[in-house]
Image: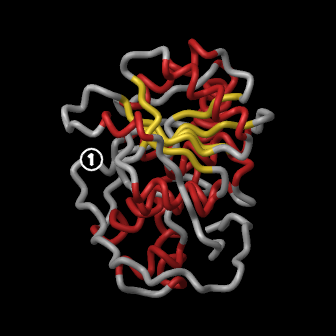
């Protein structure tokens, strides 16, 4: 993460939204282009139930804004981060209740599937019509996913691919408590190192557990595992992973953006 000063902004007239009655959908706009942010603010100003409570133009500012302002939805430009997938994971770890809508310039199937797996509620094109964007924010603020036709097809194709590998209907699989805990962490977008820290074990042990789970469920990777859990409700009623203590300010060296295979 960048260590440069982050100065997320808020405008004076927006302070009226903080009356605590929940009547507004509070939005943070994070985008590298000032003209695009200004355009969105004009669009949202025409709606009685939308309020822009903060703006950001860098990833560092976005993280600061998400922590500083009480918001329901974050409009997040994918290009604001060198690795949008990791940025999304960081944002949701910091703000588990925040709903993310990612703005992309070009459609990308792999990115779309991975972002939804990480917990994003919607992905929209930079060319989205204002009416559709407003509708999207309203649905996402209620916790509903919002997909356009192309993204819907990609998700369905991924699900069908998972199903075709399974062949005949699979019997109900019983996971052990430790396997269930690790799978729950995976569906929240955690990497193996984070899971190991959270459950008090090592990365190698996490990998070993995941291999066993893949064999049990007949899935090939983390995406298929998440789709299987969504369809089978295998995690319904499962205990949540123990909370992670607040980490110290990041000072680590650059890490690889390559997704984990296990």
Q: Residue at x 47, y 87 (%)?
A: 202
Q: In the figure, residue 252 lies in which quadrant?
A: bottom right
Name the image quarter holding the C terminus: bottom right
Residue 70 in the figure: left or right of residue 165: left
Measured as percent of width and height from the top left, residue 4 is found at 64, 73
Q: Is residue 95 above or below residue 17?
A: below
Extreme-front residue of the structure: 12
Q: Is residue 256 above or below residue 23?
A: below
Q: Secondary structure at mark 1?
A: loop
Scheme of image coloration? secondary structure
> Is residue 24 toward the left or the right of residue 107 in the image?
left
Q: Nearer the viewer, residue 80 or 119?
A: 80
Q: Which quadrant: the N terminus?
A: bottom right
Q: Which residue is depicted at the point 41% across and 34% down? A: 13
Of 47 and 9, the residue lying toward us: 9
- Based on the displayed image, in which of its 4 quarters is residue 164 positioned? top right
Above-or-below relation of 99 to 188? above
Residue under pointer 1: 236
Q: Residues within 10 Å of mark 1 (few under 14, many from 20)?
A: few
Residue at 36% in and 77% down = 246
The answer to whether residue 187 shows anywhere in this view is no
Position in image of residue 109 (x %, y %): 74, 38
Residue at left offset 56%, top offset 52%? 219
Q: Position of residue 245 (x, y in %)?
A: 33, 79
How far from the left and from the top, in percent, is residue 240? 27, 61
Which of the two residues, 168 or 154, is positioned nearer the viewer here? 154
């Amino acid at each position: 993460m960048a260590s440069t000063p982050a100065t997320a902004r808020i405008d004076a007239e927006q302070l009226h939204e903080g009356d605590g009655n929940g009547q507004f959908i509070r939005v943070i706009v994070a985008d590298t282009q000032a003209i695009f942010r200004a355009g969105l603010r004009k669009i949202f100003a025409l709606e009685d139930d939308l309020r822009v409570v903060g703006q950001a133009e860098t990833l560092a500012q976005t993280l600061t804004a998400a922590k500083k302002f009480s918001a329901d939805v974050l409009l997040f430009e994918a290009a604001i981060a060198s690795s949008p997938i990791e940025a999304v994971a960081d944002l949701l770890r910091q703000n588990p209740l925040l709903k993310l809508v990612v703005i992309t310039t070009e459609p990308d199937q792999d990115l779309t599937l991975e972002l939804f797996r990480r917990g994003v509620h919607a992905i929209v094109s930079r060319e989205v019509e204002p009416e559709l964007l407003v509708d999207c924010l309203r649905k996402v603020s209620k916790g509903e996913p919002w997909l356009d036709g192309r993204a819907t097809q990609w998700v369905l194709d991924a699900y069908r691919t998972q199903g075709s590998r399974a062949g005949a209907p699979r019997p109900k699989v019983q996971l052990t408590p430790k396997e269930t805990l690790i799978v729950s962490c995976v569906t929240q977008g955690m990497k193996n190192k984070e899971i190991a820290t959270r459950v008090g074990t090592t990365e190698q042990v996490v990998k070993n557990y995941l291999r066993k789970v893949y064999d049990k469920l007949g899935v090939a990777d983390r995406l298929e595992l998440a789709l299987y859990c969504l369809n089978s409700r295998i995690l319904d009623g499962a205990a949540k992973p123990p909370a992670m203590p607040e980490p110290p300010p990041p000072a680590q060296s650059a890490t690889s953006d390559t997704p984990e295979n296990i």
